[in-house]
Amino acid sequence: MDRVAVLALPGVVMFDLAIPLQVFGRSDLAGRYEVVSCALEPGAVATAEGLPLSVAAGLDAVARADVVVVPGFDPHDRAVDERALDALRAAVSRGARVLSICTGAFALAAAGLLDGRRATTHWQHASDLGTRYPAVEVDPDVLYVDDGDLATSAGLAAGIDLCLAVVRRDHGADRAAEVARRLVVAPHRDGGQAQLLDRPLPASGDSLADTCEWIRHHLAEDLTVADMARHAGQAPRTFARHFRAQTGTSPLQWLTAQRVHEARRLLERTDATVADIARRTGLGTATNLRTLITRDTRTTPSAYRRAYQGH
DNA sequence: TGGAGGAGCCGCCAGC
DNA sequence: CAGCTGGCGGCTCCTC
């Protein structure tokens, strides 16, 4: 059982605050995390939205936590309280994990925890973070950066992705996917090219992340479910079962979604013919691509391209 | 648009 | 006995 302390700093963003409470506090994870919200001291905390908020615990909750989450707050309002910085530093040196959501990264940076490390924050504040804390290597293009004991996430909803990544590492991909499904969010969002490269792949062999990655690089080829299962080292039936547990869909559905995604990207950024794109994405014929794109975007491929490219 | 052929999906079940 | 695996059959859906 991991104790999670969510530290609400003055000017806390309530959306960010709710994310870890919602993810780690879910009944699906009962008995695995014990979540408590805290502040500099028990009592009222100013929120970014102006709604009244009152918490029961102070910084002693941080001192007892295995995981500390710092939601976003207004970093320009005032300097972060020194007591909070001390508590965060103490938590890290004690071996606790510290996560931030959105502008919560400013508190970690102010504590000097991010010096010489990669981090991210809301894209609107990314350059500001880099300017104020030059020793921090800011990457504005990812959903989150998981650097082991320290993890930072980009704006707002990316905090969900980070919290789910923590659950995935602690309790496996299947359980994380289950929590994601109950929260009605994607089990794993890709934050563009950079996120793909930097995604922390779980070391455990039971995850299908490697196979998904492999599939993504072989979209153009004829892929059967049997091929995918072979790559995963499982029988087709077992593979399909695990696949559904982790992604929420069947192998072929997922594969087709990836292909359509790639086809859309090519429509947006290249002038390749529809037939050519169909071939390059493994969608086969132009007719097939047309029906799939139409289902996905509610327009024809050429209309989608015109709308996107603006001519 | 229709239809044929094929692949995928999933409940069921036996076996480990 | 519980839990996981993987083969089978039939229905569905996809592709051309």
Image (cartoon, coloured by chain):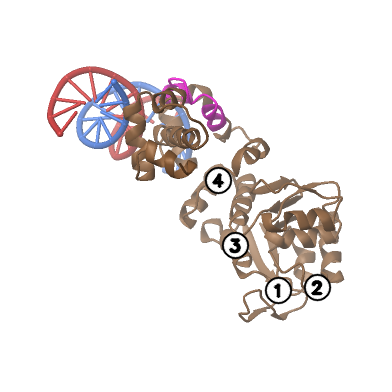
Chain colours: A brown, B red, C blue
Q: Residues within 10 Å of mark 2 (few under 14, many from 20)?
A: few
Q: Look at 79% across and 62% down and name the residue there.
A: A107
Helix, strand or loop under label 2: loop
The CA span between labels 4 and 2 is 33 Å
Q: Earlier in the sequence, mark 2 or mark 3?
A: 3
Residue at image mark 3: A19
**Do tag 3 and tag 4 residues touch (Cβ < 8 Å)?**
no
Say which of A20 and A310 sits in front.
A310
Q: Nearer the viewer, mark 4 or mark 2?
A: 2
A306 displayed left or right of A60:
left
Label ID, residue A78: 2
Residue under circle 4?
Answer: A189
Labels 2 and 3 positioned on one and the same chain: yes
Subunit under mark 4: A
For residue A11, the mark is: 1
Mark 3 vs mark 4: in front: 4
User: In the rendered view, does A304 fall on the left or right side of B12?
Assistant: right
**3D distance between C-alphas at marks 1 and 3:** 16 Å
Give the numbered dot on residue A94.
none
Q: Which residues are the magenta region?
A: A211-228
Classify A79 as above or below C4: below
Amino acid type indicated by mark 1: Gly
Q: Residues within 10 Å of mark 3 (few under 14, many from 20)?
A: many
Q: Secondary structure at mark 4?
A: loop
Q: Mark 1, chain letter?
A: A
